[in-house]
Image: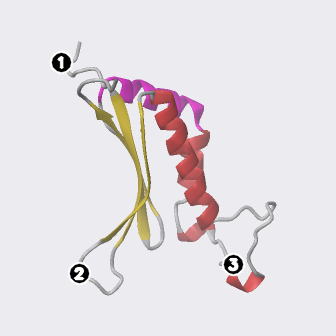
Amino acid sequence: MNGRAEPVGYWCEALAEESGCGLDETARYVLGTFRTVSPVLALRWLGGQALWIVDRLEPDPQRPVWVRPFMRSSADPALGHSGDLRAWYEDRESRRAARAHIRTGAPLLVVVPDVDRTYTLSVRPAHGRRAG
């Protein structure tokens, strides 16, 4: 064994960090949090958050969007790396490896920089006693 206690659960977060907006400090936004006892559900939630972020950065032109055309920003793939989030989500082997990784009690970070902010999806083990 690796000496780590078996995780009782998992704490998941989706964060956006923005710097250089006229401030000397970084603005940090919590986009969502989730707690579960299942590594499968933890990664499923992370995948949903990845797609949620990508859909807002680069809307799918085939899907109807309920905004006026002038409110829509033109998505230039050369400007950012949000497609990396979609690629991570769609790579089944990567998700399988991530599940095995977090089961050992190690944290998982998916960090993707975009034009003006960085997105971080994380799963951290929750050690301790089971609830109940």
Q: Residue 112 is drawn in which quadrant?
A: bottom left
Mark 2 crowd level (few <14, some 14–19, many ≥20, 10 Å Cα):
few
Residue 68 left/right relative to 17: right
| Amino acid type indicated by mark 2 | Asp
| Amino acid type indicated by mark 3 | Arg
Image quadrant holding the C terminus, namely top left
Residue 121 in sight from this viewpoint: no
- Residue 63 colored in magenta in the image: no
Q: Residue 108 is drawn in which quadrant?
A: top left
In the rendering, which numbered label is found on residue 72? 3
- Label 3–label 2 contact, CB within 8 A: no
Residue 112 in sight from this viewpoint: yes
Secondary structure at numbered mark 2 = loop
Q: Residue furthest left?
A: 3
Q: Of callouts 3 and 2, which one flags the residue occurring earlier in the amino acid sequence? A: 2
Q: Position of residue 128 (x, y in %)?
A: 23, 27
Q: Residue furthest front?
A: 132
Which stretch did the figure color magenta? Answer: 91-105
- Of residues 127 and 80, which is closer to you in this image? 127
Vertical relation: 47 (above or below) 28: above
Q: Of callouts 1 and 3, which one flags the residue occurring earlier in the amino acid sequence? A: 1
Label 3, label 2: how many angstroms apart (C-alpha)?
30 Å
Vertical relation: 7 (above or below) 10: above
In the rendering, which numbered label is found on residue 24? 2
| Amino acid type indicated by mark 1 | Gly
Label 1, label 2: how many angstroms apart (C-alpha)?
41 Å
Q: Position of residue 23 (x, y in %)?
A: 28, 83
In the rendered image, which residue does mark 1 sit on?
3
Determine the main secondary structure of the stretch shown in magenta.
helix
